[in-house]
Amino acid sequence: MKVILFAAPFGQGGQMHIHCRRYLRLMQLAGCKVTLIEHGGARSLPIPGVDQRNYPRRLRRLDGLLTTQALSFLHKRRLEPLLRSVAADLCHVQWMDERVLDVSLAGGRPLIATAWGSDLNVPAQAAPDDRARQRIGAALRELDLLIVDADDSAATANVLAGTRVPAVTLPIGIDTQLFHPELAKERARWRQQWQIEPDARVFLSARQLGAVYRPGEIIAAFAAMPAAARERSYLIMRTFGHSVGTSLSALRQQTEALGIAARVRWVGGMPYEQQPGLFVAADFSVNFPHMDAFPVTFLESLACGVPVLTNRLKAYESNGAEPYLAFTSEDSVAALSATMATALANVDALRTQAARGREHVVRNFDERVSAARLKEIYDQVLLRHSAGNR
C-alpha cells in the first residue's frame, strides 16, 4: 500500500514533529510504502525506505487578497503534479488545517486526517462566523475519515463540520520495549546530572511549554505544598515546544518569587530514545491543561511505571485509561497541590496502579498493536472508496 503522509506544519527546531515521526513508524510497521511531504521547505535527514518531498508553499500572504475560489484554484494547480507523480493509494494529513482542502481539491483521494486536539478545540471556541473556524469545518467535510485519539474529539469535529464526520479513535502507539520501568541506571544518571538526591521525590511536568498546559499553575501547585513536602521533593519542568502564551523567563521569575527556584529543574528537548530515562527519573508525572485530547505522555508515563497525577477532562475518559490515572478533586491549583502532597504519602499504592496501567498500555497501545489497527483502518477506507467508485 502506498501512502502520502503530509507532516504537520511545525516541529521542534524546524524538524518534523515527534507525533509525525511516530505516525511514520506506525505506517512502516504496517507495511506501507510512504512518501513524506514536509512543510515550509523543511527537510528531515534521510529516512530509510521513505520518499521525502516538500509541500508547495501555501502563499498565506494571499489569503486576504484573493477570493476563496481563486486561492483554491491556485493550490489545486500546485498540488496536482505532486499527487500524480506519487500515485499513492491514499493521502493522510497530520493536523487539521487548510491543507486538507488543498489535497481534496487536487484530487487526493481517499483522504484521511489525524487531529491532535488543539486543531479542533481552539476553533471550536471561536464564534460560528469566525473564518478560521469555518475553514476547519469545510476541511472536515471533505474527509473520508478522521482519526482522533479521544472520543470527544470526534464530537467536536461534528460540531465544527455541522454534520457527522466519519471518525475512528486511535491513540498514537508507543514502543513499550523502549518505554519500560527497568531503567535503574538511567534514573541514577539523570538524577546525578540534575543534582537530585537518590531518595528525593520528583514531580515531572512532561508536556511542552505552552499556556494551554498551564506550567505556571503547576509551579504554583508545587509551591503551595506544605514546606515539609517541598523540602524532600523536586519539580522538573520541560521547556521544549513553542512557548505559546507563556515564556521561560517568566516561569523562572515565578519560581524565584515563590522561593522554590532551588527545587525546580528545567529540561529542554532531547532525542526521543532518551525520553524513557526522563520518565523513570521521576516518581510522578503531573498533567494540568485547560483543554486537551488524549496525551501520549499518559501512555509513556504508565509504560514506565510512573503514576500520572492529573485534572479531569472529558478526553481522558477515552481508551480505558481512567482506572490508572490519579485525578484531582477539582480543576484548581489548590486541588492539584493537595493531590501532589497526598501522592508523597501513597507512593506504593500509586506505583501499583501505574503497574496495572503499564499492562493496559502494552496490551492496547504498543506501537505494533496500533500499527496493525492502522492497517485495518486503511484497508477499510480503501474498500469503501473502491466500492463507491464502481
Image (cartoon, rainbow, N blue to C red):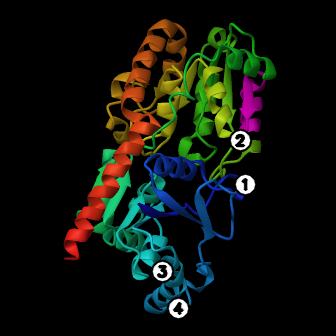
Q: Tell which circle, 4 or 1, labels the residue nearer the N-terminal end.
A: 1
Q: Which amino acid does label 4 sit on?
A: Leu
Tell me the element at label 4: loop
With 216 as the anchor, is 119 left or right in this view?
Answer: left
Q: Give the labeled residue for mark 4.
A: 66
> Residue 13 got which mark?
1
Query: What's the distance in space between the residues labelled 3 and 4, CA to CA?
Result: 26 Å
Q: Tell which circle, 1 or 2, labels the residue nearer the N-terminal end.
A: 1
As drawn, 227 above or below 117 = above
Query: What's the distance in space between the residues labelled 4 and 2, CA to CA?
Result: 39 Å
Check if residue 260 falls in the magenta segment. Answer: yes
Q: Which of marks 3 and 4 is in front?
A: 3
- The segment highlighted magenta reads 251-268
Q: Tell which circle, 4 or 2, labels the residue nearer the N-terminal end.
A: 4
Q: Which of marks 4 and 2 is in front?
A: 2
Crowding around mark 1 (Cα neighbors within 10 Å: few <14, some 14 to 19, many 20+) is few
Q: Tell which circle, 1 or 3, labels the residue nearer the N-terminal end.
A: 1
Q: What residue type is labelled 3?
A: Arg
With 309 as the anchor, is 46 left or right in this view?
Answer: right
Q: Tell which circle, 3 or 2, labels the residue nearer the N-terminal end.
A: 3
